[in-house]
Image: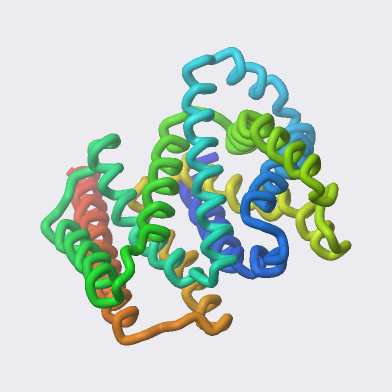
Amino acid sequence: MTETKNSQFGLFAALGCYSLWGFLPIYFKLVGNVSPDLVLAHRIFWSVPTGIVLIALANRWRDVWEVVKDKKRLGWLALSGALMGLNWLIYIWAVQQERVMEGSLGYFINPLFSFVLAAIFFGERFSKVQLAAIVLASLGVLNQTINVGQFPWVAISLCITFGLYGAIRKQVIVDSRTGFLLEVLLLLPFAMVYLGYAWAQGAPLIAETTSDSILLSLAGIVTAVPLILFALAARRLRLSTIAIMQYIGPTLQFFVALYYGEAFTTGHAITFGFIWLGVIVFTYGAWTRDRREKIAAAVAAAE
């Protein structure tokens, strides 16, 4: 695959994953009768057979075995899997507690946090414009804490866990399907122990209703598709490009929150105003920097 086609594929993969994540709260609303911890355990459990099918269809068993033998890569996937599981639990709880809007706030902040990670671990440089964007986002968090009277811990937790997850998956050389399967396999023993405990306490095998049981059994597909698309995009795009495209997901989540009637007060408007202004400034900074780099490359090629 040529570099141009590789980048185009990465862009389509990113567009697909962020669109699916944008509408993900609807799925968790549909299984709202099931507690977040059980939804998480089932999500991990049903992701395993989904991951196995994907590996079998692609005939990637050799890749799986190679990563299993590589203790360093397996260790990184254990860490990314733990971050993924924690992120899932926080988000499921937030949706069921009617805090989708705060979740979307976290994913609006996440691209800025991702750029901080890119600067620390991948050598990308801050510009004054991008630093201004981070300051604006910080003011938004400060306003949410002081004027709204609620520290946005859900938003901050989602931002940190997913940002670190993305950074790890970018630097670990592993096929997206292989990485996903090994992550959920590493989480599976914890999920099985918890499900066994829940069943011993009288919980149903899957869920109390047929509809909830069907929805939970689809959790693997709902989970796997956007995650694999994200991993494909992360390996083909610059982290700063991924950061810009991440705005698709939280924008859709924001409108989903409004659809479900979550509160949007003047205080919330000020918070999101700071965040959105930071997003605009950050995007402008990234665009101008990429434009300068393209012009410099074109001039160098012409000489």
- Residue situated furthest left in the rendering: 128
Examine the rendering and report whether any part of residue 157 can be seen. Answer: yes
Q: Which residue is drawn at 42% across and 46% down?
A: 161
Query: Which residue sits furthest front?
Result: 201
In the picture, residue 59 is in which quadrant? top right
Residue 226 left/right relative to 152: right
- Residue 105 in the image: above or below residue 128: below
Q: Nearer the viewer, residue 58 or 154?
A: 154
- Asked if 220 appears above or below 68 in the picture, the reply is below
* Horizontal relation, residue 152 to residue 95: left or right: left
Residue at 58% across / 48% down in the picture? 227
Residue 164: image location, x then y, percent: 39, 42
Task: Describe the colour scheme in one phrase.
Answer: rainbow
**Image height of 262 relative to 156, above or below:** below
- Left/right placement of residue 80 relative to residue 149 reads right
Image quarter in which the N terminus is found: top right
Q: Is residue 54 visible in this depiction of the protein?
A: no
In-front residue for pair 246/253: 253
Nearer to me, 244 or 4: 244
In the rendered image of this protein, does residue 96 appear above or below residue 303? below
Q: Please give the name of the residue rendered at 59% of the width and 13% of the height, measured from the top-left corner.
A: 69
Q: Quadrant of residue 175?
A: top right
Residue 238 location in percent, x, y? 37, 46
Q: Residue at x 39, y 66 (%)?
A: 105
